[in-house]
Amino acid sequence: MDVDAYSLAHRRAWDRLDYLSKRSKLTGAEADELVLLYRRTSQQLARLQAHSPDPELIAGLSALLARARGRVLGTRADTWQEIGRFFSHRFPAALYRSWPWWVGVAAVFLCVSAGLAVWVERFDSARDILGIPSDTGSLTAPGGAFETYYSEHPQGAFAAQVWTNNAWVTAIALFTGVLILPAVYLLFMNALNLGVTAGLMSEAGRLDSFFGFILPHGTLELTAVFVAGGVGLKLGWTLIDPGRLSRAEAVARQGRATATVALGLVGVLLVCGFIEGFVTPSPLPTPIRLAIGFTAETLFLVYVFVVGRRAVTEPGNSSAEAAGDQADSVTQPTFSTRTAVGSG
C-alpha cells in the first residue's frame, strides 16, 4: 500500500469528519454525514493498521475516531476518566517516544558533572577559574551548609518551595528548548553546580554525606530535569528538521507533546519535593533513604518503558490517546538561577 497516496486520497474526508465532530450543533444531514464518515474512517483505519508502518498516521486517525465516536454516541467524556487516560496513556507515551533524547541528555550531563567534580577535587586551578573560595569548610563540614540546607526550614514549606523551584526549572528547560542554547545553558549550570559540590565534598572526604543527601530525592529529580531538557531540545530540533511535515505543523505537533510532558512532570516533581522535604532530611538510616529514592526512580522508569511502550505499541490501546502529542490534533497531524539539584 502506498500510504502517502492513500492518505492524500482520503484526507479531505478525514478533515470533514474532524470538522463535524468539533461542531457544537449539527443539522440532520450533517449528523448522517458524521455517522457515514465515522464508519468509513473506521474501516480505513483497520486497513492501515494491517498494512501501514506509520504510527503517526494511525495515531492521528485513532484520535479523530475517538472524538467522532463521542459525538456519534452523544456522550461527554468524564473528567476523571480523561485524567486517568492522561496518566495511563498520553503522558507515558510522550515520555517513551522521547526517551532517546532525554537519555542522551542524562549521559552528557552526568559525564560533565563527573568531569567537573574530578577537576575541582584535584586541580587548584579550578578554584581560581570558577571563583571558589579557598576555605569551603562552612559548606562541606559535618553540620555545614550542604547538610543544614535540607533541615533549616519547616518540612512542609521546604517541600513546597522545592516543588515550585523545580517546576520552574523544568518549565524553562522545556520551553526554551525551541531556542536550543538557553536550554543547553540551563542544563550546564545544573551540571556545574552538582559537579562543583561533589568535588568539594570529595576533597573534604565526605562523599558519603554527599550521596546520602543527594540521591534520595536527586535521582528522580535529575531524571525529571533530563526529561525536560531532552524534550525541550527535541522541540528545538524539530524547528531545524521538521521531517515530512511543514515546519509549522511539525513544531505545533511537538509543542503539544512538550505541553503533555510539562503537565505530567508536575506530578513527578511533586513526588520529588515530598522526598526532598520529608525523606532526605529525616533521621532514617541512609540505606533506607536511598532505597526510597531508588524505588521512586525504578517506578518511574517502569512507568516509561513498560506502561509507555505498551501505550504506544498495543493496537488495543487507542494510539492517539496514548500519544499526548497527537490526541488534540487530527486535522493534519498524521500526514505526513538556583538549579534543580545542586545543593538541593
Image (cartoon, rainbow, N blue to C red):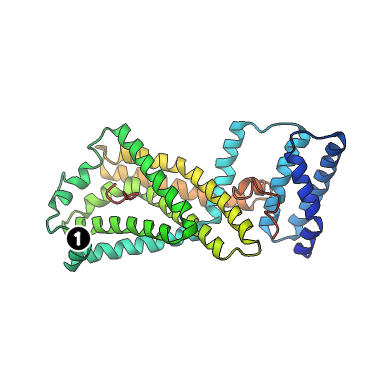
Name which residue lies at 29% across and 51% down: 342
Within 10 Å of disc 1 (Cα), the crowding (few <14, some 14-19, many 20+) is: few
Q: How many numbered discs sit on the rendered protein?
A: 1
Could you say where residue 299 lies in the image, as x and y percent from the top left? Answer: 45, 46
Left or right side of 263 for 315: right
Could you say where residue 174 lies in the image, as x and y percent from the top left? Answer: 47, 52
Figure quadrant of the N terminus: bottom right
Left or right side of 328 for 304: left
Of residues 99 and 77, which is closer to you in this image? Answer: 77
Which quadrant holds residue 321?
Answer: top right
From where the camera sits, is residue 285 visible? yes
Disc 1 marks a residue whose amino acid type is Gly
Name which residue lies at 47% across and 59% down: 179
Label 1 residue SS: loop
Could you say where residue 343 lies in the image, as x and y percent from the top left? Answer: 27, 49
Query: Can you say whether 131 is above or below 331 in the image?
Result: below
Instruction: Name the residue carrying label 1.
Output: 131
From where the camera sits, is residue 224 visible? no
Query: Can you say whether 108 is above or below 288 in the image?
Result: below
Name which residue lies at 65% across and 50% down: 314
Query: Can you say whether 329 is above or below 122 in the image?
Result: above
Could you say where residue 21 lies in the image, as x and y percent from the top left? Answer: 75, 40
Name which residue lies at 67% across and 46% down: 318
